[in-house]
Every structure is written in structure tokens, then in C-alpha cells.
Image: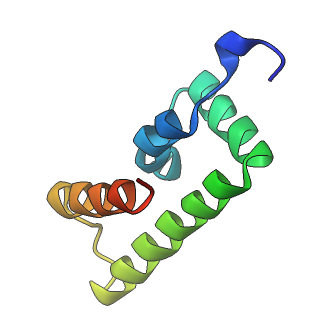
Amino acid sequence: MNDPVDHLACVELVELVTAFLDGDLDPVAERRVVDHISLCDGCDRYVDQVRQTTDVLAGLSGGAPLSDEARERLLAAFRDSIG
């Protein structure tokens, strides 16, 4: 991440985390997220928390995927929790 144009800010990662975990990012955006979480302990923990939470919720729902509304509420709650 030597090029400042390629640097991903923490706030940008928060907006991309759902698409990242779902595998919906293009290769360039995915690489930026991976590079960022390899350098930022806070965002690495954040991605793990979102992943674990969605896994638990999927388990509670019998493996059914979260609705878009539930996913957005969950993401909003995580955004609020980080400030």
C-alpha cells in the first residue's frame, strides 16, 4: 500500500465489509480490503466480528441467509458501535 491512491480508510472498509464477506467485490477492491486488514488490527477484528455474528445468525435461522433488511440493520449496528 505504498500508493496513497490505493489506501483504504477504515470508514471505507466498514462500507465494504458485507460485500467483502459475501465475495461480491471486484478483485481490485477485494485486494484493497485484504491489504488494509493485514495492516489494521482494529479493522481485522471488526471483519472477524461481522463474520462471526453473521455465522451465528445464520445458524439460528437454520442456515437461511439473512434478509437484506436484517443485514443492513446489522451493518448499521456495527457502524454505530465504532463511532
Above or below: residue 18 compared with residue 34: below
Residue 44: % across, % down: 67, 56
Label total for image: 0
Q: Is residue 19 left or right of residue 45?
A: left
What x and y, as percent, mark residue 60? Answer: 32, 88
Describe residue 40's horizontal placement relative to residue 33 as left or right.
right
* Residue 8: % across, % down: 61, 28
Q: Quadrant of the N terminus?
A: top right
Direction from residue 15 to residue 52 in the image, left or right:
right
Judging depth in this view, the residue of 53 and 41 nearest the camera is 41
Instruction: Look at the picture and state if 73 lies above or below 61.
Output: above
Nearest to the observer: residue 16 or residue 30:
16
At a point 44% along the width and 75% down the height, the residue shown is 53
Residue 51 x/y as whole percent? 51, 66
The reply, left or right, for residue 66 in relation to residue 11 is left
Q: Residue furthest left?
A: 69
Image height check: is 73 above or below 62?
Answer: above
Q: Residue at x 70, y 47 (%)?
A: 37
Q: Identify whether 13 is placed above or below 55.
A: above
Residue visible at 37% across and 53% down?
A: 79
- Residue at left 28%, top 55%? 76
Considering every residue shown, the one lying at the far right of the view is 2
Depth check, front residue: 48 or 79 = 79
Q: How is the image coloured?
A: rainbow
Task: Report which quarter residue 30 is drawn in.
Answer: top right
